[in-house]
Image: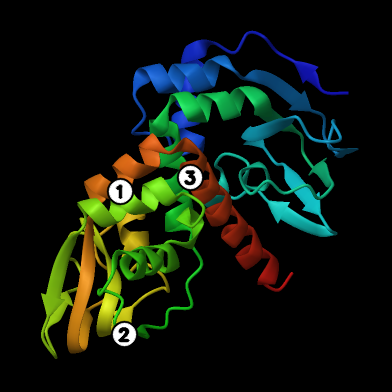
Amino acid sequence: MPREDLLLTDIERRVALREIVGFAELGEEALASVASLSRRVQYSPSKSLAWPEEPRTSMRLLLSGDMHVVRKGRVWPYRREHRLLDPFWLARDTEPLEIRTDGGADVLEFPFDALEELLEEHFSIVLATARKLALLWPSSGELMHLHATGRNATLRGRLGAVAEALPVARGYVDALLRIEEEASEARFATGETIWRPGDPADHLLVLLDGSVRGAGERGAIGWRDVLAKQPRAAKLEATRPTLALRVSEESFLDVLEDYHALARDLLAMLAEALIGELEAKPR
């Protein structure tokens, strides 16, 4: 059976969270809130056990040793780049899981209910997790050619364009209205360069009319770079006269902060995409 060790200090918990979960930018209050929820659990070598609860009510973060999760017969290694808040929980996945360890594992355990409340109280935790997931967002590496026609004539058309570009927000009419209201129009001539590799990602674009070449993903153009807080990865140019809504990074993040359910749905979408990409890889 696993054993608890209550001697792990609050400082040790915070250090572990900063290093393992990628919460290096969290403020002390948010970090302390996450750390306070955890308890330390140790698994002996050659341990294999079903997830302790069904349905699951808690998650584990690996401190040291090795820990693998088995889902639908597939072993999921907890590599460092994937050590973040449980992607299965974030994706609201309900598949049965099994924990395995070869040499033993030292983990932190967190209750799901308390974590959900924490996400609602501290947007910085939502944002840190979303940034980590956006960095892991699966990409084919292919640059796309996106088109739109006549979406600027009416408010309904513009809202439809925003909903199509940000499908996770389709059920949040007030959020869509606010994004459209706070956005500014941007016009580009044929052949005009909209951004280059290395440019700061301080806004995303919703295509209303025209076409662009160089988008790295479908939907709102440049959203992944904005969310991941990384420079533009590829050149984007207009291939004919183009009209788009320019949504600033500040406006986009403010909407996520003010609509927690939308932000939580975004985490679920990002985590589900990560799980799908890893499952598609050869075993």
Among numbered discs 1 and 3, the one appearing first in the sequence: 1
User: CA separation, marks 3 and 2?
Assistant: 28 Å
Q: CA distance from mark 1 to mark 3?
A: 13 Å
Q: Foreground: 91 or 187?
A: 187
- Going from N to C along the chain, the mark reached first, 3 or 2, is 2
Image position, residue 38 (x, y; %)? 62, 20
Residue 162, placed above or below residue 189: above
Residue for badge 3: 262
What label sits on residue 154 in the rendered view? none
Q: Residue at x 33, y 52 (%)?
A: 177
Looking at the image, residue 53 sits to the left or right of residue 254; the answer is: right
The residue beneath circle 2 is 149
Left or right, 251 with respect to 217, comes to left
Secondary element at tag 3: helix
* Residue 209 falls in image quadrant: bottom left
Give residue 69's position: percent from left, percent from top: 76, 47
Closer to the camera, 88 or 213? Answer: 213
CB within 8 Å, label 3 to label 2: no
Q: Amino acid at mark 3?
A: Leu
Nearer to us in this view, 122 or 35: 122
- The residue beneath circle 1 is 178
Q: Is residue 85 visible?
A: yes
Contact, mark 2 vs mark 1 (Cβ under 8 Å) = no
